[in-house]
Amino acid sequence: MSTRISRRNFVKDTALASAAITMAVGAKPSPAQGRLPQDTPLPTTGPLPPAKGTLPMGKIAGVEFSRLILGGNLIGGYAHSRDLPYVGTLMKRYNTEKKILETLELAETHGINCMNSYVMDGITELQKHWKRGGKMKWFAQVRMDPGGSFSQVSKAVDLGATAIHITGDAADALIEKGQVERIGKMMDFIKSQKCIAGVAAHSMKALVESEKARFNVDFYQKTLHTLDYRSAPRPDETGELGSYDNSWCRDPDEVIEFFWTVKKPFIAFKVMAAGAIPPRKAFQHAFNGGADFVLAGMFDWQVEEDVQIAREVLSDVRRTRPWLG
């Protein structure tokens, strides 16, 4: 880290900057970008079209990834829909195989070179994207088998994952059971398979304990967002998951503080709190708060706009790290 700002004043500064931008944008709404006319769908066969843009890159374990990563929750129907139970089904109905292939094409041609999804959902569409010449790298989410073995890791390796990480809920559960050493064993197994290994978490405990134990971890992934939105956790909600299929970051200040000193790449996820926070504000908070990469779920019509926002935010980010371009 070559530049250091006041960590404790960071959130206030970012909030003020975001408010100013929101006022400016709110005065004259701009049309959504990246949206195609309904009568001109993207082809989903044949070679991919030429690149239309690039993104700043960073490295994890020597491998180069775009600093904006395509999330798989919207594709898999994991809606975190709060009290709207139909949203997950709606996402699955919208994201047909053809639509997923269109989304992958849009992401890659606009500079996103990696996506993140749960291994047990399979990667049929990603494999078809690869056959078209796509170079999208895959971060696979995995859980541990009940008996402690790693069949999901093996499945991810067989399917072609570049990086593999334990899911946040699985890591949190192991910490609560006092079984932190099992996280370390999974990291060792992932590394033995020649894959990049990571720990994801909703709670800071899993990351703090993993760092304390000096596990063979290449990156950490943690929820990070502001708490100034309507369905943010209330004082009486002390868990990491809400009542209505809502997960959150209860401890943004602690996350920012932790990653000012930890010398491992940091991927921030749920930065928009499942759509409750606008992408510009979310990306600013995450990148200026120490995130090296942001994992964001995007529908096809959001990809181009989110990429442009990420470029603009990263052009003014106030932190550098040795593994960032």
Image (tube, rainbow, N blue to C red):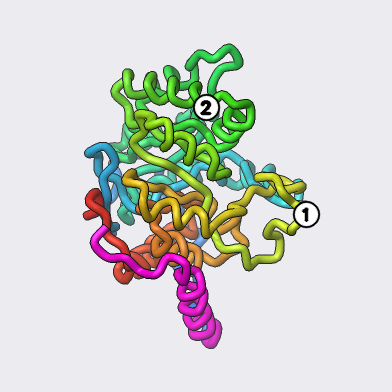
Which image quadrant is residue 193 in?
A: top left
- Where in the figure is residue 36, as x and y percent of width and height? 46, 61
Query: Hey, which residue is sitting farthest front in the picture?
Result: 212
Q: Which mark is residue 159?
A: none
Q: Residue at 54%, 57% (x, y): give it.
A: 252
State whether residue 223 appears in this view. yes
From the image, which quarter does the C terminus lie in?
A: bottom left
Q: Which amino acid does label 2 sit on?
A: Val
Which image quadrant is residue 320 in?
A: bottom left
Give left or right: position of 212 versus 95. Answer: left
Q: How crowded is mark 1: few (under 14 residues within 10 Å), some or many (20 or more)?
A: few
Q: Judge by depth and name the residue closer to the eye, 310 or 8.
A: 8
Q: Residue at 52%, 37% (x, y): give it.
A: 206
Judge whether 141 appears above or below 158 on screen. Answer: below
Q: What element carries label 1?
A: loop
Residues rendered magenta in the picture: 1-27
Q: Residue 236 carries which label?
A: 1
Q: What residue type is labelled 1?
A: Asp
Give left or right: position of 234 versus 293. Answer: right
Q: Residue at 50%, 63% (x, y): give it.
A: 282
State whether residue 50 appears in this view. no
Instruction: Provide the residue designation for mark 2.
Output: 180
Give left or right: position of 303 versus 321. Answer: right
- Where in the figure is residue 152, as x and y percent of width and height? 49, 20
Q: How far apart are marks 2 and 1 (CA)?
A: 27 Å
- Where in the figure is residue 154, as x and y percent of width and height? 42, 17
Q: Judge by depth and name the residue closer to the eye, 249 or 28.
A: 249
Q: How crowded is mark 2: few (under 14 residues within 10 Å), some or many (20 or more)?
A: many
The magenta stretch spans residue 15 = yes
